[in-house]
Amino acid sequence: MSSKVTIDAVIKDSTVQLKHISDTAKLDAQILLAFALGVSKTYLYTWPDRILNDTELQTFDNLLTQRLSNMPIAYITGSKEFWGLEIDVNENVLIPRPDTETLVEAVLNIIPKDANWNLADLGTGSGAIAIAIATERPNLQIYATDISDAALLITQQNIKKHNITNITLNKGSWCHALSQLKFQVILSNPPYIGKNEATQNLQHEPQHALFAEQDGYCCLREIIKTAGAYLTNNGYVFLEHGATQAKTIRDLFIKYNYQKVTTIKDIAKHDRISYASQK
């Protein structure tokens, strides 16, 4: 791009380029340009004829090049909105998905507003789920775990950013990272994609947070098998899973003597969350 180019022209030109790699090309262009200029998207609508200077154009071109290499928008801008919160992210953590808000909603539905329960978020990543729940249920004691030091650094950054005081971080693998406490709720959005299902769109995200052995069931099975020992009587396990995995997850819950097994659909009407309680 050359000088004397307007905001509107930049958006139109980059939208055409982005259509080859994105289903939300215009939105991507707007987000990148707003980020490059340090303004809101509303500003772009208000001043479409504003001419960009050479420095602004170069900054935007650098961002566009990253996006055209399939780098996710959230990694380029360093943040992703989740549950109305701006969550910092980098390539050490999974980008929070809108579907995962279904998990937050399902958990909140069974926790009284003034409850002082213990809750564990296994494989917390950016901390998005734990932080969303903490903002809604400030009396909970939340224990967020991850096996990755780099992920826990981002979690800590987000906890500080949102002034959360009721989350404790533990390093370790799934339930093995938990203390000797008993929990009313244990939840997780673990890796659940089979390793034979890898796609280019996921190449920049941490592979260990996406893909699992045993056709995607390895981590789900491990959590279901071990979580019961850490639950209070009538405590719950909530799991996010793939759209075709619900029946197997329900069968696993039953195999390991859980009760009240339930599956919930996400915003796209796909089976996404299954939960059960300990007898």
Image (cartoon, rainbow, N blue to C red):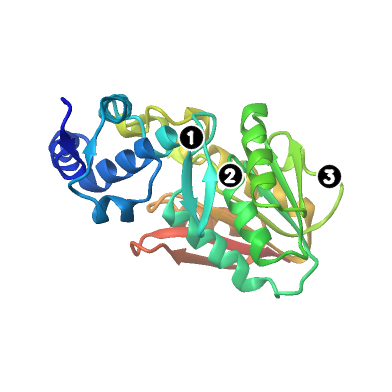
Q: Which residue position holds label 2?
A: 221
Q: Position of residue 138 (x, y in %)?
A: 73, 64
Q: Answer with mark 2 or mark 1, whichever residue precedes in sequence.
A: 1
Question: Quick one: SS at disc 3?
Answer: loop
Query: Front-most of 90 and 34?
Result: 34
**Relative to 2, residue 130 above or below:** below
Q: Position of residue 119 (x, y in %)?
A: 73, 57
Q: Answer with left or right where residue 125 lies relative to residue 46.
A: right
**Relative to 272, residue 216 above or below:** above
Query: Front-most of 195 and 119?
Result: 119
- The quadrant where residue 106 appears: bottom right
Residue ID at (77%, 55%) = 166
- The quadrant where residue 65 appears: top left
Can residue 96 be seen from the camera position used here?
no
Q: Answer with mark 3 or mark 1, whichever residue precedes in sequence.
A: 3
Disc number placed over residue 93 in the picture, else none = none
Label 3 is placed on what type of residue? Ser
**Residue count near mark 2 (Cα–Cα under 10 Å), binned few <14, some 14–19, many ≥20:** some
Q: Answer with mark 3 or mark 2, whichever residue precedes in sequence.
A: 3
**Residue count near mark 3 (Cα–Cα under 10 Å), binned few <14, some 14–19, many ≥20:** few
Q: Position of residue 15 (x, y in %)?
A: 17, 40
Disc number placed over residue 179 in the picture, else none = 3
Q: Which residue position holds label 1?
A: 214
Residue ID at (80%, 67%) = 116
